[in-house]
Amino acid sequence: MESSSRAAKFQAGSCGEDLSPATSLYPRSSVDTYSSMASSAELEDLETEDCLDYSAIPPLPVYRHDIEEINVRPSTPDDFAALFPSMNRLTIRHDDFTPDGNMNLRVDTVVLGRRKKTIQLFHLRMYDLNKREFSLRRYCRESGREVCNSKRKYIEPASTSRPNLQRSVSTAVRSLTKRPQLSRIPTGGSVFSSRSRPGTSHSAATTEPDDEFADVLSHALSADKKQKVRPMATNTIKLEFSNYARVDVVRRGNRNTKRYEFEWWGHKYSWKRVVDKLTDSVSFHLLRDGQSHTPVAHIVPETRSPNQVAADERAGGWVPPCHMWISDKSLVDAMTDVADVVVASGLIALIDDCIKERWQTKKIHRIGLPLTSKSMDVEVVSPKAFVQHMFMRRNSDHHPSPLRFQRAVAAY
């Protein structure tokens, strides 16, 4: 009861007020800016993946997590303009005020002063995990101030064979050109005499051409509907912002070299995935124009004890609590709203990686290579490297065969 009353108090907030004047009061809002070169190369759309079925991700359980921060409240337009963008640290976690909190993420910031305050800046709601259909809003969940929405890009699989409908129609047309087989209808006189009246062109045929064409065509239409192939998922997630700008976030690399790339106002950005060898935790670092030594933004998971990790799993959480911050002052001072794009793309990279690791990780099969004592993962090695390992000679420290390098013996 206490938790529900606090949740109701939190959601009451300031989200019910009319937020439409905020656009004119704050020129740095997303709807007042424009983008150039916001999409990646179209060739990347052809990089498809063998993803699971549409229903691969099971329904998530009810989220039952203890409320971490009771005094958190949604931001107002005044709060948001004062707190974002900045180089302050942001907190990403599931929304523990609602029973479907594992399908929602909150982005909060802490305001220090005489009294510590936690203010929510963004809210990401996830509608479909398979299709990556999300909505990022400012202030809170009930706010109508959407920053962007996302969806996965699908393509129709290429068909090399002739469509069934075309073949069936061709068969029907050929059947019409054939001369119909006529049958002679017996008359009353033929019953009593051996001579019968010859058939005429008006005699009844065994099949009517129009009926045959209609049957073949209807069968072809029904077969075409049954054999319709589902579109293939690509590695691209499309972000559509409220100012009609579009950003394509493209996943590249394998599990060890994974990165999420996008373009914004002539600059190329990449969220690089890094795995800590000691703790096995995953972090992301945003690189600009290939400058790998100077990241401009970071997403780092919170340090949790094993008991906290187990408690989050039991509660139904699947995105670990993380911290996000911008480390480059130029992103904060830019007039292109790149900070909004950094937050949106970072959340997409984090969620997509969690989905892939939790539900859509390919099984790795280890096989032994012939004539060697080595084994390799066939899922992560290229075909060229696989062939090279197969035909690689034994190491020099192996003992030679007893049939080699021995003294020749004369044979008679």
Image (spheres, grey):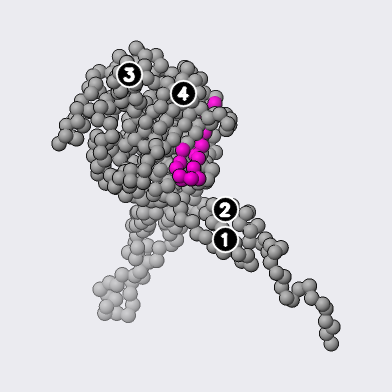
Q: CA distance from mark 4 to mark 1?
A: 46 Å
CA distance separating discs 3 and 2? 54 Å
Q: Which mark is residue 375?
A: 1
Disc 4 target residue: 338
Image quadrant occupied by the N terminus: top left
In the image, residue 208 above or below residue 7? below
The earlier-in-sequence mark between 3 and 2 is 3
> Percent position (x, y) of residue 296?
51, 27
Dot 2 corresponds to which residue? 381
Q: Amino acid at mark 1?
A: Ser
Q: Magenta segment, which residues?
A: 267-283
Mark 3 or 1, closer to the camera = 3
Looking at the picture, tell me which residue is in the foreground, 122 or 89: 89
N-terminal label among 1 and 2: 1
In the picture of the structure, the residue carrying the numbered disc 3 is 113
361 left or right, relative to 40: left
- How far is disc 2 from disc 4 in space, using C-alphas? 37 Å
